[in-house]
Image (cartoon, grey):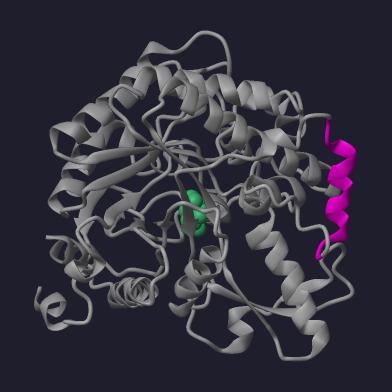
Amino acid sequence: MESAQQDSLLHKQLFGDHFIWGVSTAAFQIEGATNIDGKGVSIWDTFTKRKGKILNNDNAEIASDFYNRYKEDIDLVHQLNIPNFRFSISWTRVLPNGEGEVNPKGILFYNQIINYCLEKGIVPWITIYHWDLPQVFEEKGGWTNREIINWFTYFVQVCAQNFGDRVTSWIVLNEPAVFTGAGYFFGIHAPGRVGIKNYLLAVHHAVLSIVAGAKTLRAILPNARIGTTFSCSHIEPFSNKTRHINAAKRVDAFINRLFIEPILGMGYPVNEVPVLKGIEKIKQQGDEQNMQFAFDFIGLQNYTREIVKCSYFTPYVFAKLVKAAKRKVETTSMGWEVYPPAIYEVIKKFNGYKQIKDIYITENGSAFDDINANGVIDDTKRLEFLKNNLKQVLKAKAEGYMVNGYFAWTLTDNFEWAEGYHARFGLIYIDFKTLQRTVKSSGKWYAHFLK
Ligand code: GCO
């Protein structure tokens, strides 16, 4: 396509030779095959069976059928000139009971993915945990049970021992703010639990597990590059009234600072969010040392910005988000504002933490209602989103901020959690009836850009 050539301000070379380009995926969203070849049940298998939890009551039993079509999809990664492929390991596919015996067919599946990537010259990046906790553990409290640290450490060990001879890039877990907040406080994601007590326990155990997992990887694979990923949104107050500014600070603490700061040795942001003092009661002796790790890189995942208003009716945070629809701004089909400068702002913000050694954007993307016109998917909005976000990443880089990688979310349309199949994020279109794949204009552009 000529558009990439014409866009002289956006050229791959401008990012430098060492910039890491990739695409990200997650096991539960793509694999399907939820109960074959010995796979055990995860909290998402259970949650998707509950009526009314997922839009249109969609489930992920087939998803994009990556389990059966991984070769075709990795061929597409190759065809799109994408050098790095990020995927996650389904815990219950490799450990059907969460712990104990491994499932050889599960190990084989991920070995096949890794080997096929390497055969195609693609670097595999493993996310160990992308939200699909074994249901057996949820029955014992899941992330609210401190035992999770041991369960998770064992899972990390199994992954490191089985895949670490060929995989050097590791992400311990994905977006703790989302799986604790949506899963244990709001109940809109699996396991669907609510309440501040569950939430604070889940948060603290997630921090300890991230660090325990990272230390385990380091011990088994001393040469691995170890990172972990955080969701982050650019936060702005509704107006410059003090109460809105303070509300924005509180939301920022919850959304952006809650996990990175303890891991960097700064503790929880209790000044802005006093309810986090509740974690003090949960903490045990020695936890302080076990909350910190010097990650080789931090993965930032950004999609939008949030505008925050003070609200005394919302407990704990005393703030609410002003929906993009109300603000009459352009939105994606997730209802999120299209606001590319957000990615620049989060890069800048995280550059403020001097202890961070390296920063990659490990997810960024957009969902729009694509139209398949006889096999042509002209997703102009997604293409513009991609280009405009890359321009902002480049701007950050040009201004001297550390950012050395970009992974698009995501390869193919997939199962978007509570949104089911309604939200299409892929560079590649999937007809969910035939499972046929068609590269969208955005995918063609990315391929050309990466050439
Ligand atoms: C996340 C997850 C992805 C989502 C994506 C779009 O960031 O929430 O990592 O699984 O699909 O972000 O919502």
Along the viewing direction, whichever of 6 and 442 lies nearer the viewer: 6
Indicate whether residue 274 is drawn in magenta.
yes
Q: Does residue 43 show up?
A: no
Q: Is residue 293 left or right of residue 271?
A: left
Q: Does residue 440 show up?
A: yes
State the image coordinates of residue 369 (x, y, percent, origin top left). Answer: 39, 69
State the image coordinates of residue 277 (x, y, percent, origin top left). Answer: 87, 51
Along the viewing direction, whichever of 73 and 396 lies nearer the viewer: 396
Residue 103, placed above or below residue 17: above
Q: Residue at x 15, y 39 (%)?
A: 121
Q: Pick the quarter of the image with the N terminus.
A: bottom left
Q: Given the current orientation, which residue lies at the most extreme top position?
A: 101
Main secondary structure found in the magenta portion: helix
State the image coordinates of residue 254 (x, y, percent, origin top left). Answer: 71, 60
State the image coordinates of residue 249 (x, y, percent, origin top left). Answer: 73, 72
* Rendering quarter of residue 363: bottom left
Along the viewing direction, whichever of 261 and 57 lies nearer the viewer: 261
Q: Given the current orientation, which residue lies at the most extreme front position?
A: 354
Q: Residue at x 65, y 50 (%)?
A: 259
**Segment tinted magenta in the rendering:** 272-284
Indicate whether residue 349 is drawn in magenta.
no
Q: Residue at x 20, y 41 (%)?
A: 122
